Amino acid sequence: MKSAHIIFATCILLFVTSLHAENYEISVTRKGSNLYKIDGEDTFIHTRYCYEYVYYEDSFLRMRGYSGEIVFLDAGEKCDVIAVYGASDQDPGTYSISVTREEDDWYEVDGQQLFIKTSSCLSLALGEDAVLRLNATGYGELHVGREKCSVEGVYSKLRL
């Protein structure tokens, strides 16, 4: 009888855990090391140790709060998701900030919970002072040391 209670409790626990997960059918394209863009959306998925080179790949995203996993359906591979980011509505202007490189073309604004997507930026910044210039469209430039990088957008974490 005791084992029946354990099995029942385990089933209830698995059911409750699955209630807190959100599942999404999406299509993604790799945009950088550990960085995938949801096709047709201004949303990025940041993964950990993910080496899938995909282009418009049907995928399945399973999230629990801020983290989860992505399954690439054609390849049959899955990767851990560190976070999902959506476009952040930033006012145009010039900002003095400190940045740290997270991945290729992906920088965190230190202490702000904001992330900057750049294009062909080679800076290996680690808490480095920078200047961010944004125009009304959200594009602009990031100046890190002597390097000037094109900014494709500013993003913040989404809770899914």
Image (cartoon, rainbow, N blue to C red):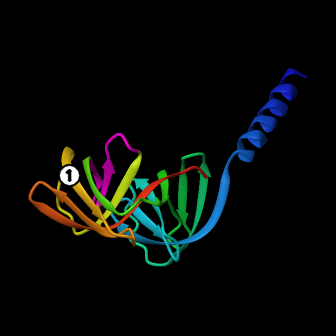
| Span shown in magenta | 99-112
Is residue 33 at least partly visible in the picture? no
Residue that appears at 58% across and 70% down: 26
Q: Nearer the viewer, residue 143 or 107?
A: 143
Q: Nearer the viewer, residue 48 or 113?
A: 113
Residue 122 in the image: x percent, y percent?
Answer: 17, 61
Name the quadrant containing residue 110. top left
Task: Give the farthest residue toward the right.
Answer: 1
| Helix, strand or loop for the magenta stretch, by majority | strand
Percent from the top left, x then y, of residue 102?
30, 51
Asked if one can make out residue 27 in the rendered structure from this viewpoint, the answer is yes
- 38 and 8: which is toward the camera: 38
Instruction: Tell which residue pokes out farthest to the left in this image.
Output: 146
Residue tagged by mark 1?
A: 130
Q: Position of residue 53 (x, y in %)?
A: 38, 71
- Per the image, label 1 sits on a secondary structure element best described as strand
The image position of residue 2, as x and y in percent, is 86, 21
Give the answer, above or below, for where 26 lies relative to 130.
below
Please check the rendered image and state whether residue 118 is part of the magenta-colored stretch, yes or no. Answer: no
Q: Is residue 20 left or right of residue 126?
A: right
Q: Residue at x 18, y 52 (%)?
A: 124
| 88 relative to 13, above or below | below
